[in-house]
Amino acid sequence: MAINRDFIGRTFPPTEPYEVSRVKIREFADAIGDPSPLYRDAEAAKAAGHPDVIAPPTFPIVVSLGNPALADPELGINYAMVVHGEQRFAYTRPMRAGDVVTCTSTITEIKSIGNNEKLTVETDIATVEGELICKTYNTLVERGA
């Protein structure tokens, strides 16, 4: 079954607000094995010009993959056959402790590549006040039978 191409161009409403905390940033940094003090020590972050600890560059995946675009059953994606294709981030500024953010996702591409289906989702991550922090680009590949 092919992924539902009627979803191309569909933008989903913003997610519920997510508060970025020092604890979550530290846990994420620990999980990826990055010992940078910018992710753990507010004074080190302030000395580097930030108002508080910042999140590692890949941290937005924590909030961006919980978007409703990928949860809609009418999309028709078989997650048992999905592999991660690509991921990248384009930043306006670092994400930091204290940010309260939402994600607005758009499915920008669905296409067949051989027996596989490729789906690309772009997500704007912004503060609840409307300041864009970053845009994520995620590509998933549903392997063919």
Image (cartoon, helix red, strand yellow):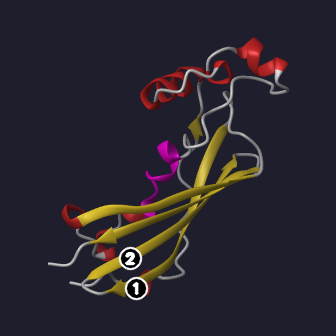
Kind of residue indicated by mark 1: Lys
Identify which residue is drawn at 34% across, 83% down: 4
Task: Indicate yes or no whether the magenta region holds residue 75.
Answer: no
Quarter of the view holding residue 44 = top right
Residue 24 image position (x, y, % from top left): 51, 26
Which residue occupies the foreground of this view, 98 or 29? 29
As rendered, which of 73 and 132 lies closer to the eye?
132
Kindly identify which numbered label has been placed on residue 79.
none
Residue located 41% across and 74% down the image: 119
Q: Is residue 66 magenta?
A: yes
Judge from the rendering whether residue 112 lies leftward or rightward of residue 81; answer left or right: right
Mark closer to the chain start, 1 or 2: 1
Residue 86 locus on image (x, y percent):
46, 62
The answer to whether the residues at label 1 and label 2 have Cβ atoms under 8 Å apart is yes
**In the rendered view, would you say 36 is above or below 94?**
above
- In which quadrant of the rendered image does the N terminus lie? bottom left
**Pointer 2: what residue?**
118
Main secondary structure type of the part rendered in magenta: helix
Q: Which residues are magenta?
A: 61-69
Q: Is residue 20 above or below residue 130?
A: above
Observer-nearest of 17 and 9:
9
CA–CA distance in space, label 1 to label 2:
5 Å
* Mark 1 lies on residue: 111
